[in-house]
Amino acid sequence: MLLSSLLDKFKFSRRLLHLALAALPFAAVAQTKAPTPVDGGTLTYAVSQEPTSLVSFLDTKTDNRNISAKVTEGLLRYDAKFNPQPLLATSWQVSADGLKYTFKLRPGVKFHDGRDFTAEDVRYSVLTQKKQGPRGRITLANVERVDAPDPLTAVIVLSKPAPFLIKALSSAELPIVPSHRYADGDPLGSANISAPVGTGPYIFEQWVRGSHLVLRKNPGYWRTGTPRIDRVIVKFIRDPAAISTAIETGEVDVAQGVSLADLERLAANPKLKVDDGYDGFLNNASFLEFNVENPVLSNPKVRHAIAQAVDRNFIRNTIYYKRVEVVNSPIPRVLSDYYDDSTFRDTFDVAAANKLLDEAGQPKQANGQRFALRLSYIPGAEFKRTADYLRSALARVSIKVEIVDGDLPTFLKRVYTTRDFDININGLGRLFDPTVGVQRIYWGDGVRNPLIWVNAAHYDNPQVDELFRQAAVEVDAGKRAAQFKQIQQIVGRELPVLPIVAVPSIVVHSARLHNFNNSIDLMSGDLADAWIEPKK
């Protein structure tokens, strides 16, 4: 047990070190890599999922974020310790009462269409995301207004403190879009969603649906000397094995979503590098969400029985090839001050699961089954394999599972609109603060005001909501920690959502590529510092 504990700590420390190196400031990143970068060339990389939007303005899906941050920038970026660094804002000041955030904006910055970037764009972006963003309704809930006393000053005024807000202003998390591109229309219908205009180092050029998209270097980028790469081509390849082949043969320079079964072979290739750095910004994890509006699943005993029937170590070892950690609480363990897994103790035990189902009033019927469930899952190779495993695992406790699949739009509609599912495997970012990332998993407002990525379980506990409200404005660190721990204890007992495993951010890239990551949130960096050696 001691050796296992030490190894776990070593792995976790190694991930944090990897994160720290990946998130060093601009100059430091350059100093730790090859000393003689070159300009020019085309970077081609493969991803397994096509984005639904090219700007993470009102849809913060990971695939959207990764593209968006290269075109559209935020006010700030962050070092490895989440200390804010200048981006579109050159300086900032927070009032003593925590109710006013004053940002001095970078002068001379232009959008890709030639229009000036001003405080009006900040105002529009913040207020629109507060109203319609999947995380904005929580992250920006305390925003009362945004003042623009002059074109290069933006003041975010809060009705209550938001101690997490200064960490939520990155390019991917809260992008600043050109207000003139949205005018007075519905922002969800704006052309900027599929043909974005931003201030970033790359300019959108083309999106061929189902095939690829193209970005080109912004020659007027405000940060002189960057970006270095002329063109970026992102290919959409759904088959993980095909992605592995593409990186192995040199068809692409970067691959995300490779088959985990191929990683050992790819890592042995001297022309390739495997980067499995831990994304401490997103803290992605997979969850099994119970539709608590289902009469059978409304009973917490049934949910705990299902949890006991699931061997999460099997998922970690077999489906994810031991490249992930089992998750024992919705709050990431890296947020150690807030972490409490004391009530998430449903260890794998088929006999106990069968007994609990009997106690819950769900005996086997004449056909040998207790009941049937429809299982949906977010598209992705590992999520599909997890769904297949769950069908088999739940059969051992006489629960029949029908897997319903489809593309991402189908998944989103099924889970968040028509609610045509009973249990759902989802991938969610737990993020850098529980108010921003974890609250939405349980937030009762998501029942009354449905939004994608918010409370698919339709769990509605006023006590939990109130604790989240208190924590969102609590400036005393000890009290805030106690509130988050109490939340975990409640949702662990009631279990509307079962944490499964962390979702890795694994990238395989050519050894010719340097400085690919320059952000704490890894793939959601802007590629401004990346450069690629010419092929020999």
Image (cartoon, rainbow, N blue to C red):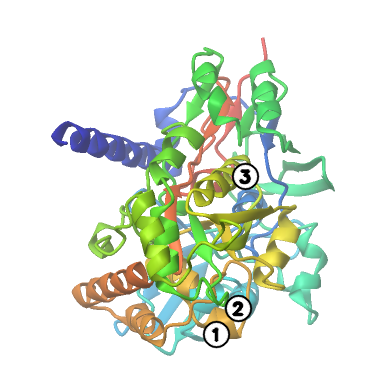
* Residue 147: mark: 1
Q: CA distance from mark 1 to mark 3?
A: 47 Å
Question: What x and y, as percent, mark residue 175?
Answer: 60, 63
Q: CA distance from mark 2 to mark 1?
A: 7 Å
**Residue designated by label 3:** 384
Dot placed on the residue nearer the N-terminal end, 2 or 1: 2
The nearer-to-camera label among 1 and 3 is 3
Q: Identify the residue at image location x=56%, y=79%.
A: 446
Front-most of 223 and 317?
317
Quadrant where the N terminus lies?
Answer: top left
Question: What x and y, as percent, mark residue 468?
Answer: 38, 79
In which quarter of the view is residue 527 placed? top right
**Residue designated by label 2:** 123
Q: Secondary structure at mark 2?
A: helix
Question: What x and y, as percent, mark residue 230?
Answer: 71, 34
Q: Identify the residue at image location x=41%, y=33%.
A: 322
Q: Within 10 angstroms of label 2, few (less than 14), some, or many (20 or more) residues?
A: many
Q: Is residue 356 above or below residue 37?
A: below
Q: Which amino acid type corresponds to the residue marked 2 in the rendered image?
A: Arg
Q: Which amino acid type corresponds to the residue marked 1 in the rendered image?
A: Asp
Q: CA distance from mark 3 to mark 2?
A: 41 Å
Q: Is residue 495 visible?
A: no
Quadrant where the C terminus lies?
Answer: top right
Q: Is residue 460 left or right of residue 65?
A: left
Dot placed on the residue nearer the N-terminal end, 1 or 3: 1
Front-most of 125 and 317?
317
Q: Mark 2 touching mark 1, by CB under 8 A? A: yes
